[in-house]
Amino acid sequence: MTTETVDTTTTASQLDAVLRSLADLLDTIPADRDSAPTPCTELDVATLRQHVVGWLTAFTDGYAAPSGVCSDPEAVTAAGTGGGQVRALADRLATLLPAAAQEPLRIAGSAMPGGMALQMILWEYQVHGWDLAVATGQSWQADEAGLEASLAFAPGMLTPDFQGEDKPFGPPVAVPTGAAAMDRLLGLSGRNPRWGADRVG
């Protein structure tokens, strides 16, 4: 997918809504759930919180930098719930996007069209919001149009190099015909939409 086909204004708005929902979610995670498992293999709640805060900082720094180079996500420490950091980063992104998405974003040494990167980030945070919600017994809602946009975008990223056993994304999980957009996106991303149904209330 090329930057010419990306409606960066709409994608930026959809990402903003997801990030603000994520910030609220993080603020309501009970402290005693930090060591709880998540659908992300080998990541507990605390580690996944660190991941989403660190990478969101890196992406935001990249959009802000004239060079487009993302900062080091490992250099960031989630403070408290992490909700305040995500909210502040959403505020910062709102001042940068969609204009900044017209330039490449450089992630770990590789350049990606800024609009494509924005779609990737939306997809990632839609799914990670769900990861954290189901791991802590909370609900997670995402805009239907944004989910459908990610369903259209994600297959182009889920090549055999990235999806399968022992890959960043697990094998696709079949979901029922007519399943909700969130469940279809989860299954496409290698998540079982029923994960944790018998673990937390």
Image (cartoon, rainbow, N blue to C red):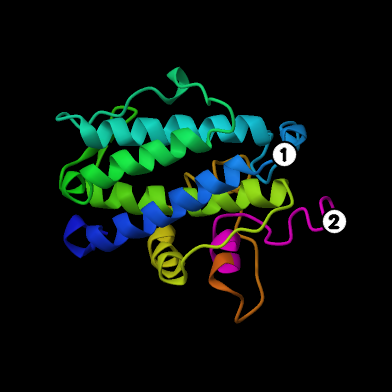
The answer to which image quadrant residue 104 occupies is: top left
Which of 80/36 is in front? 80
Which of 106/84 is in front? 84
Quarter of the picture holding the C terminus: bottom right
Look at the numbered disc 1 and give the secondary structure of its residue: loop
Q: Amino acid at mark 1?
A: Pro
In the displayed orientation, state which residue is furthest to the bottom.
178
The answer to which image quadrant residue 168 occupies is: top right
Which of 136/124 is in front? 136
Task: Report whether 146 appears left or right of 11.
Answer: right
Task: Report whether 33 appears left or right of 72.
Answer: right
Q: Residues within 10 Å of mark 2 (few under 14, many from 20)?
A: few
Where residue 172 is drawn, which disc sits there? none
Q: Is residue 103 above or below residue 126?
A: above
- Looking at the image, can residue 159 be seen? no
Instruction: Return the residue at label 2.
Output: 198
Q: Is residue 139 above or below residue 66?
A: below
20 is within the stretch colored magenta: no
Q: Amino acid at mark 2?
A: Asp
Where residue 30 is drawn, which disc sits there? 1
Q: Which residues are magenta?
A: 183-201
Task: Report whether 138 appears left or right of 3.
Answer: right
Q: Disc 1 and disc 2: Cα gap in Å?
A: 19 Å
